[in-house]
Image (spheres, rainbow, N blue to C red):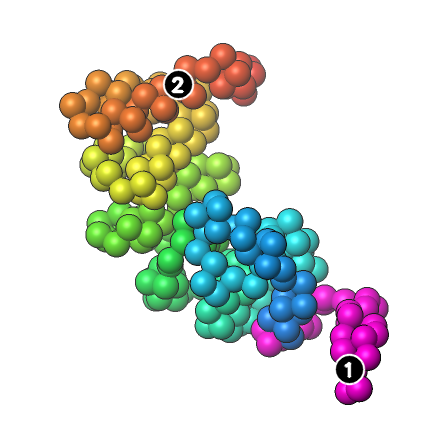
Amino acid sequence: MGYVLVAGATGKIGFAAMALPDPGWTADEIVAHLRTIGTAENRAGMARFGINTATALGVGNSELRPLARKLKQNHERSLMLWETGVREARLLAAFTGEPKKITIEQCRCWAGDFDSWEIVDTVSDLFAGTPFWRELIGEFAADEREFVRRTAFAMLAWAAVHLKEEPDATFVSLLPLIEVHSDDPRNFVRKAVNWALRQIGKRSPALHAPALVLAQRLAASADKTARWIGKDAVKELSDAKTLERLSARKA
């Protein structure tokens, strides 16, 4: 049992008992809790990092992630959290959603709502765990909407990190997709394309070589965006610490 500061009927300030978060909480109870812990200071900080704060309550990820662990996964509740439109509720929807239960249509619907790089990158981690993640990557990469296209490459970056059982050949086959969209100059797309290339190159010794070759080719491109993506990826993939980690993994 915790306590929250409240104003009573007479206007007197006091503390009221508040239940601690648990897996049985409904979406409405979660949002009500979020409203009690959000701050204007946090909202201002988010705005400085380019996060869309139009629906934000001012609760940072350092509080949301532990809360998500207490709430645990719940697919139906995650859909209800998403429907609230509240930034923090949507992040919790991603943290507590169940990738094996969400449908491809629900993924498409959520992607259509994306309005911030933060939401994209958080939800992409959930999407990368679905059985149809490769289909979504291809579909979202072809979409002209900036945040939807970013989703494709954020998913690819997360997949390279988390899908340990996926064969390296899958990621080799997706390198051409990176090259195709390496000339998209929009900030949130180019950064995600770069992210995906770097993560693939760092995934394994076998993937490092083809990723580095692509990075070098892009670095020599006449296109300004592709050149930036390539040069930045070459820098990280050629870094001594990266090479040391890959060498240790190979050994």
Q: Is residue 20 magenta?
A: yes
Q: Which mark is residue 157?
A: none
The image position of residue 110, as x and y in percent, is 39, 63
Choose the circle earlier in sequence order: 1 or 2.
1
The image position of residue 246, as x and y in percent, is 50, 19
Left or right of residue 177: residue 249: right
Circle 1: is it few (<14), some (14-19), or many (20+) Cα within 10 Å? few
Which one is nearer the viewer's eye here, 248 or 62?
Answer: 62
Check disc 2 and report the residue beneath it. Answer: 235
Magenta residue span: 1-28
**What residue is shown at x 68% (from left), y 72% (from top)?**
24
Left or right of residue 168: residue 86: right
The image position of residue 175, as x and y in percent, is 29, 32
Circle 2: is it few (<14), some (14-19), or many (20+) Cα within 10 Å? some
Identity of the amino acid at label 2? Lys
Dot in front, 1 or 2 = 1
**What residue is shown at x 36% (from left), y 39% (from top)?**
192
Identity of the amino acid at label 1? Gly
**What residue is shown at x 32% (from left), y 21% (from top)?**
231
Left or right of residue 66: residue 109: left
Dividing the picture into quarters, in which one does residue 9 lie?
bottom right
Residue found farthest to the bottom: 9
Q: Quadrant of the C terminus?
A: top right
78 over 218 or under it: above or below: below
Tally of numbered discs: 2
Check disc 1 and report the residue beneath it. Answer: 11
Distance from disc 1 to disc 2, alpha carbons, whole Å, reads: 60 Å
Dividing the picture into quarters, in which one does residue 58 lie?
bottom right
Q: Secondary structure at mark 1?
A: loop
